[in-house]
């Protein structure tokens, strides 16, 4: 019914209910500097300026409050599109490493190790990116080489 | 109703899905061997070895034209592992990534993907061994005429 969306560094998270939003804000998973979009609006506002959050506010610094983070949808995302793509099309070993790191995310999230989950998700993304780059670069190099050899062959044939 | 943020993930997911579908249609129309700029496998061209994906381009051509047996003879692991993984990425993971929802892929699915990827790696070794095998190891176009005929 009521859908709040959160944006941070170009990534969008959600939808959340107002209760979830407040909960995550309290726990520090949603930062005061994050952008939030209210239900039914197109407008993004800074979290710290929202009346919904001002009551619950001054997010008690998470390290101090610490103990009980909500185990709901934590702000860690990892999906398998990139790793599978790299595995099948680019660079199998890099894809495997990427999948191994992605496999650590769900366990760490359910253990409330949000930081560790984020780290694993980032490493998964890093290896996926390098796999993509390695795949594309080696392929372009090979094609260039192939065209060159083909061209040289055509020239020597015509002579 | 909900404001849309253009995210990098959505863009990448879209490019991926469209790219794969385009490739599938293209390979369905043209047999890779008939395309002059066809991607010739660098590994096979330089070393003579068969990589885990060797035969996939030709196999996709046959799959797009309904000849599963011909595809099987070129690269059985494409049917057993490659395509299922690709389907998961295309029809399940990519739409979810594009939806912008915060989620991590379910643990069992990641495990399945990992096992699949490791089997593919082993496949790359096994298919170069001079052994007898119940499934075709080396890509073979031979069965194409058999299924056509």
Image: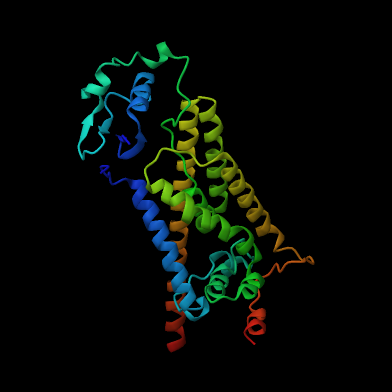
- Residue A26 position within the rendered picture, expressed as x and y whole percent measured from the top left: 35, 19
The residue sitting at the right extreme is B132
Colouring scheme, one of rainbow, by chain, secondary structure, one colour: rainbow
Q: Quadrant of the C terminus of chain A?
A: bottom left
Can residue A113 be spotted in the picture? yes
- Residue B74 position within the rendered picture, expressed as x and y whole percent measured from the top left: 63, 71
Q: Quadrant of the N terminus of chain A?
A: top left
Q: Is residue B65 left or right of residue A14?
A: right
Q: Residue at x 46, y 40 (%)?
A: A78
Q: Residue at x 60, y 42 (%)?
A: B108
- Residue A144 position within the rendered picture, expressed as x and y whole percent measured from the top left: 42, 67
In this picture, is A135 found above or below A106?
Answer: below
The residue sitting at the front extreme is A1
- Residue B105 position within the rendered picture, expressed as x and y whole percent measured from the top left: 51, 42
In this picture, is A38 found above or below A144?
Answer: above
Is residue B115 or residue A147 the one in the foreground? B115
Is residue A22 or residue B148 the one in the foreground? A22
Name the image quarter holding residue B48: bottom right
In this picture, is B56 found above or below A23?
Answer: below
In this picture, is A136 found above or below B2?
Answer: below
Can residue A144 be spotted in the picture? no
Q: Is residue A136 left or right of residue A16?
A: right
Q: Residue at x 65, y 70 (%)?
A: B72
Q: Residue at x 65, y 74 (%)?
A: B69
Q: How many marks?
A: 0
């Amino acid at each position: 019914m009521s859908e709040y969306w959160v944006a941070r560094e170009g990534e969008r998270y959600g939808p959340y209910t107002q209760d979830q939003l407040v909960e995550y804000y309290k726990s520090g998973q949603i930062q005061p500097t994050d952008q939030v979009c209210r239900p039914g609006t197109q407008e993004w506002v800074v979290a710290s300026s929202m009346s919904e959050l001002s009551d619950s506010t001054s997010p008690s610094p998470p390290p101090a409050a610490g103990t009980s983070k909500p185990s709901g949808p934590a702000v860690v995302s990892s999906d398998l599109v990139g790793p599978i793509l790299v595995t099948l099309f680019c660079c199998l070993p890099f894809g495997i490493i990427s999948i191994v790191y992605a496999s650590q995310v769900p366990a760490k999230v359910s253990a409330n190790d949000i930081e560790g989950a984020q780290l694993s998700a980032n490493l998964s993304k890093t290896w996926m990116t390098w796999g993509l780059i390695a795949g594309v670069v080696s392929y372009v190099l090979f094609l260039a080489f192939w065209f060159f050899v083909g061209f040289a062959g055509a020239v020597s044939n015509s002579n | 109703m909900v404001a849309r943020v253009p995210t990098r993930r959505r863009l990448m997911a879209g490019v991926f899905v469209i790219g794969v579908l385009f490739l599938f249609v293209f390979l369905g129309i043209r047999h890779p061997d008939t395309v002059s700029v066809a991607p010739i496998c660098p590994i096979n061209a330089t070393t003579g070895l068969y990589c885990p994906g060797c035969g996939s381009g030709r196999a996709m051509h046959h799959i797009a034209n309904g000849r599963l047996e011909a595809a099987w003879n070129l690269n059985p692991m494409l049917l057993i592992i490659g395509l299922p993984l690709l389907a998961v990425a295309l029809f399940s993971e990519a739409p979810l990534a594009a939806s912008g929802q915060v989620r991590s892929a379910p643990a069992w699915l990641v495990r399945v993907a990992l096992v699949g990827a490791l089997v593919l790696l082993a496949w790359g070794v096994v298919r170069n061994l001079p052994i007898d095998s119940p499934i075709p190891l080396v890509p073979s176009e031979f069965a194409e005429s058999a299924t056509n005929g």
